[in-house]
Amino acid sequence: MNENSQYQHTDPGVGLDPSSPFSAPESADGMRLCYGCRRLQRCRLGIESERLDDKGVVISHVVCESANEGGPEVAHGGWTAGVMDELVGHTLLLNEEFGVTGTLTVKFVRPVPIGWPLIGRAWFTGRENRKVFVRATLVLASSGAVLAEADAIMIKRPDTHFEQHYQWLEGQRGAG
């Protein structure tokens, strides 16, 4: 990536390689943070913590904040889809793999209540060449009631994925 590129991410003091897909820092609770969340030092989607259990399932503790309210006292559907995307993506990250979302199908089972503790779970269901199949659920912590389910096809990418994207994007300036 060009040093002068407007797409280069820099954050003085962090000392991370912005071209590495694994460069995201962790919150105090061990949550890997994307570039948009690292300045907040917390996940803006409300994922408070995550861990990989001994069966390979990523278990996340989530709360939807009122800023993401769509209907009265319930989450916006875009928030729910965003959280499901984050859950499936972190399944690869916590297994030291890098991939991007190819497809994400979300089933909205029940409205997600604002401010309630939620549990997200995500796990691998299969592999085919560069495709990694992942399933996720979002449930109420209090009762286990299912609120949302998702199936994703993640596409494994090389470590140079973002560098390649920035080069492609630079070529789009004169297009059209």
Image: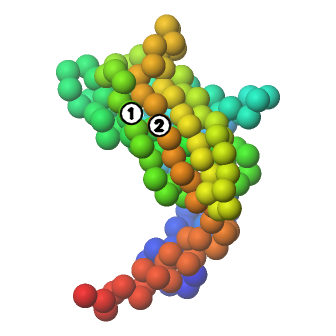
Label tally: 2
Residue at the (56%, 37%) spot, across then down: 135
Quadrant that contains the C terminus:
bottom left
140 is higher (above) or lower (below) than 128 = above
Image location (x, y in percent) of residue 7: 46, 74
Label 1 sits on what residue type? Lys
Location of the N terminus by quadrant is bottom right
Give yes or no for contact between labels 1 and 2 (Cβ–Cβ under 8 Å): yes
Q: Residue at x 28, y 33 (%)?
A: 76
Q: Residue at x 38, y 33 (%)?
A: 107
Q: Residue furthest right?
A: 54
Mark 1 secondary-structure assignment: strand
Q: Is residue 20 above or below residue 74?
A: below
Q: CA distance from mark 1 to mark 2?
A: 6 Å
Residue under pointer 1: 107
Q: Is residue 4 above or below residue 143?
A: below
Relative height, residue 1 to residue 15 (above, below):
below
Q: Which mark is residue 172?
A: none
Identified by mark 2, the residue type is: Ala
Using the rendered image of the protein, determine whether residue 49 is visible from the camera's viewpoint.
no
Query: Residue 101: where, in percent of width, then height?
Result: 51, 55
Dot 2: few (<14), some (14–19), or many (≥20) neighbours within 10 Å? many
SS at circle 2: strand
The residue tagged 2 is 150
